[in-house]
Amino acid sequence: MLNQFLPFLTALGEQTGVAQLYWGNVLMMAIGVAMILLGVVKKYEPLLLVGIGFACVISNVPGSSLLQPGGLFADAYLGVSMLILPPLIFFGVGAMTDFAPMLANPKLVVLGAAAHLGIFVALIGAKLLGFTIYEAGAIGIIGGADGPMAIFMAVKLAPQLLPQISVAAYSYMALMPLIQPPVMRLLTTKKERMIRMKQMRAVSRLEKIAFPVVIGVIVNLLLPAVAPLITMLMMGNLFKEVLVTERLAQAAGNAIMNITLILLDVAIGSTMVADKFLTVSTLEILGLGLFAFVIGTGSGVVGAKMMNLVMKEKINPLLGSAGIASVPIAARVTATVALQDDPENFLIYQAMGPNLAGVFGTALSGGIMLALLQ
Amino acid sequence: MSKDTLTFAVILSVIDFVLCFVMISGIGGIIYLLRYLNRFGKLDETKMRL
């Protein structure tokens, strides 16, 4: 009797994931759980980490049908690889963003470029480690701290590295409150951190409406390679600012953004499968990404200090670190660090200027890189 | 020149970084000019809303 059942039980066992499970899957599941905990307990970007972490756990269950063609995770990944989701994220961000801080103080826009030195340090570092120039370019963009842009560049230049690059970009963006402050404090004195900024001028509705239209045209003219992202950012912003398309702006900033975010979380998490992810190159990319964030934060602060050498009215150098693109995380970190030295020094509005400029800085870096490499 | 070399990576980085500064300064200049639109008139936000 047992002899007859045993083959059936063996065959049944082989069809389950248990037979294929190995230590790598278990390790990745633990990483997924850690991401969920970081989001839930520490509140580090829960909208990203909880979804990515859950998809990572499930994707490491061997044989999960969600990853097979036709499965939801596989379909969500198509949205990334076909470059549908990153522009939609930009669309939502545009509909939620008030560009007035950037329009009110155009001088600070330069900080959006200064804080991107990390991109190039990481690019050269990746080349030194033996990555191809295309892979190095895609890895470098992690330093821009712009998730959709990092995905966009990875798909264009090195699709095989998309999992590592997207995970590094989004993880470090979530961990910016831990990464940036030590660098900011190291490069500034308490006196510098306590510099107060004067109140900015009010920006008119006409300026706010003209801005997305003008930038949309310029980006499509000069940098068609990254135009899909910036164009959608500007379209979302136009919907917000014209006041007559409030429904569309609400949809872009809420429903569309949330759906896209869920799909993006699932797509990124589903790429964190042990056999592809647990490699030496993953560790190298994570290391380079962290290095790029540190250098970018530092170069932004140094850039702001250099501006102070020539400007009559001094700016708080902490604003430089907000030049990293991650909106509004970098601006929030700047404001938090400033408040620790002077509880009445509210920099959040001023920090949003370079922070928004950082989005353009990363897009420009990426667009120029694509133009030079392709 | 082969693109897949360290030398090209350094050249690419320098060109990209400098051009990024130039272009973002250009965007800053355009943003600065936008304020002059206000000379042509003012939009009435109450009338604009549906």
Image (spheres, rainbow, N blue to C red):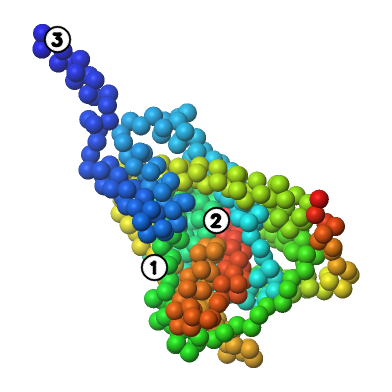
SS state under label 3: helix
Instruction: Please provide percent x and percent y for residue A238.
Output: 73, 56
Q: Which residue is mark 2?
A: A149
Instruction: Please provide percent x and percent y for residue B25.
Output: 67, 74
Chain designation of label 3: A
Direction from residue B14 to residue A94 in the image, left or right:
right
* Disc number placed over residue A178 in the picture, else none: 1
Chain designation of label 1: A
Tag count = 3
Closer to viewer: mark 1 or mark 3: 1
Alpha carbon separation for disc pair 1 and 3: 60 Å
Count neighbours of disc 1 (C-alpha within 10 A) and say few if under 14, some if 14 to 19, many if 20 or more. few
Label 1 amino acid?
Leu
Are the numbered discs 1 and 2 placed on the same chain, yes or no?
yes
Q: Is residue A184 above or below residue A280?
A: below
Closer to viewer: mark 1 or mark 2: 1
Image quadrant in which the N terminus of chain A is located: top left
Image quadrant in which the C terminus of chain A is located: bottom right
Q: What's the residue at 78%, 64% (across, down)?
A: A205
